[in-house]
Amino acid sequence: MGRALVIGAGGVASVVVHKCCQNPEVFEEILIASRTVEKCEALKRKLDGGKTKIKTAKVDADDTNQVIELIKGFNPDVVINVALPYQDLSIMDACLATGVHYLDTANYEPPDVPKFEYKWQWAYRDKYEKAGITGLLGCGFDPGVTGVFCAYAQKHYFDEIHTIDILDANAGDHGYPFATNFNPEINIREITAKGRYFKEGEWVETEPLEIKKTYDFPEIGPKNIYLLYHEELESLAINIKGVKKIRFWMTFSDNYLNHLRVLQNVGMTSIEPIEFEGKMIQPIQFLKAVLPDPASLGPRTKGKTNIGCIIQGAKDGKPRTYYVYNVCDHQECYREVGSQAISYTTGVPAMIGAMLIIKGIWQKPGVYNVEEFDPDPFMEALNKYGLPWKESFDPVLLD
Ligand SMILES: NC(=O)c1ccc[n+]([C@@H]2O[C@H](COP(=O)([O-])OP(=O)(O)OC[C@H]3O[C@@H](n4cnc5c(N)ncnc54)[C@H](OP(=O)(O)O)[C@@H]3O)[C@@H](O)[C@H]2O)c1
């Protein structure tokens, strides 16, 4: 039925490729292209021989012309961008130049300013609409499934949504004193930024990790959660009509935060370039080089993740509360695709989004966030492709 160009060959890309190969009726052929072509070839060696044909290529996705050449040579239906957020715009430009649909899992960030904002990518709306192509933004788990959960709640259970709390818990243990579950640079930039949430039409800013609570998660138990800014808050505040408050919470262990604090205090998480042995380096990039590769955590990580949304509002004039979440087991993910749950929970939705685009179910000229599409086919596919969800109408609430 279709062809996908997967850009990137890291933890998330590996899951995307595994999942595309499990779905060969849709993904007849894929091209895995990344900066380090050996990683693409290693993925091909693992998965070759099935029904999905796999090709590999080397590309520097910061260079739009290289991506254009790649697209012209392979002629995909969709480009799945699972490289880094820094490449979003150059890849979007290449899709525009060639008339190919685009999907990513993280919003554009300029490399030298740690700022998550959709404005750079939303600026492509008219151009994509005129070109008749779909740009699907933030189609991982969070952002991604969390937006689909909200759209599903809005469609089926609420007349009005008043508050959304997105809760992201990782109770996995990899046994290292300190490691990040996905790209360390992106991860640390996210956590060390100021917190922010949406309340009554305004953005309220907090110091990094200033607001802490404890939540007793289904199947995981009580965990400390911290309020963070997360990119889906920006689009949900616009797309979930009438919402009054949206917050995002993530779990961190005391051990993780102690290590992070020390690294921050000594300047290792800084993105300010410094001169080292005659060369300019960003300390955070050096840190990334010495930390365990997130892709290597798979075999060691035990435990589960629980990511979901607690939504409060009204239906038929009566107050209603709804909690929808997915629980994912690190070891089960590893057994299935050779990756831990963080990569798995991101890669599966990216494959589902690409599948819905190829099938024409989620095609709409323009640039959109996931909650702007019909959630039903996506929710059905989550159950089918490894991320089943559960719901409760009587959850414990956050105050
Ligand atoms: N929405 C969600 O739920 C969610 C959750 C987790 C992660 N994410 C996002 O998923 C993406 C991938 O994360 P990951 O953990 O897989 O990261 P990763 O393991 O660091 O992999 C990134 C891949 O991109 C490649 N790359 C980097 N710069 C490139 C360039 N200029 N041209 C071509 N390829 C390039 C890297 O190549 P090298 O091998 O040469 O370094 C690597 O293969 C990130 O954008 C992350 O923010 C989203």
Image: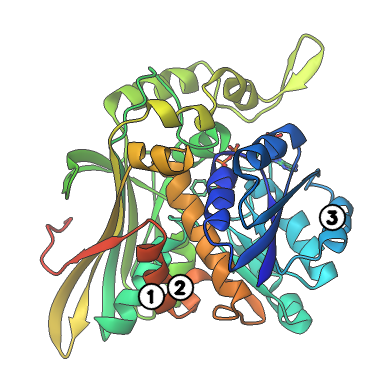
Q: Residues within 10 Å of mark 1 (few under 14, many from 20)?
A: many
Residue drawn at 51 percent across, 22 percent down: 292
Q: Judging from the image, what secondary structure is the residue with disc 1 in?
A: helix
Q: Toward the viewer: 141 or 321? A: 141
- Could you give the CA–CA distance between mark 3 and mark 1, rounded to whole angstroms? 35 Å
Query: Relative to 275, is 192 above or below?
Result: below
Q: Are marks 2 and 1 in contact (CB under 8 Å)?
A: yes
Residue 96 at x, y percent in the picture: 79, 69
Residue 47 at x, y percent in the picture: 60, 44
Task: Mark 3 vs mark 1: give the one in front.
Answer: 3
Residue 245 at x, y percent in the picture: 31, 66
Q: Toward the viewer: 269 or 54? A: 54
- Could you give the CA–CA distance between mark 3 and mark 2, rounded to whole angstroms? 30 Å
**Amino acid marked by disc 2:** Glu
Q: Quadrant of the C terminus?
A: bottom left
Query: Relative to 152, is 219 above or below?
Result: above
**Amino acid marked by disc 1:** Ala
Q: Judging from the image, what secondary structure is the residue with disc 3 in?
A: helix
**Amino acid marked by disc 3:** Leu
Q: Earlier in the sequence, mark 3 or mark 1?
A: 3
Instruction: Find ligand 1 in the image and state its quadrant.
Output: top right
Residue drawn at 34 percent across, 41 percent down: 332
Q: Judging from the image, what secondary structure is the residue with disc 2 in?
A: helix
Q: Are marks 3 and 2 in contact (CB under 8 Å)?
A: no
> Label for residue 70?
3
- Could you give the CA–CA distance between mark 2 and mark 1, rounded to whole angstroms? 5 Å
Q: Which residue is mark 1?
A: 151
User: Residue furthest toward the top?
Assistant: 277
Q: Quadrant of the N terminus?
A: bottom right
> Label for residue 371?
2
Task: Mark 3 vs mark 2: give the one in front.
Answer: 3
68 sits to left or right of 87: right
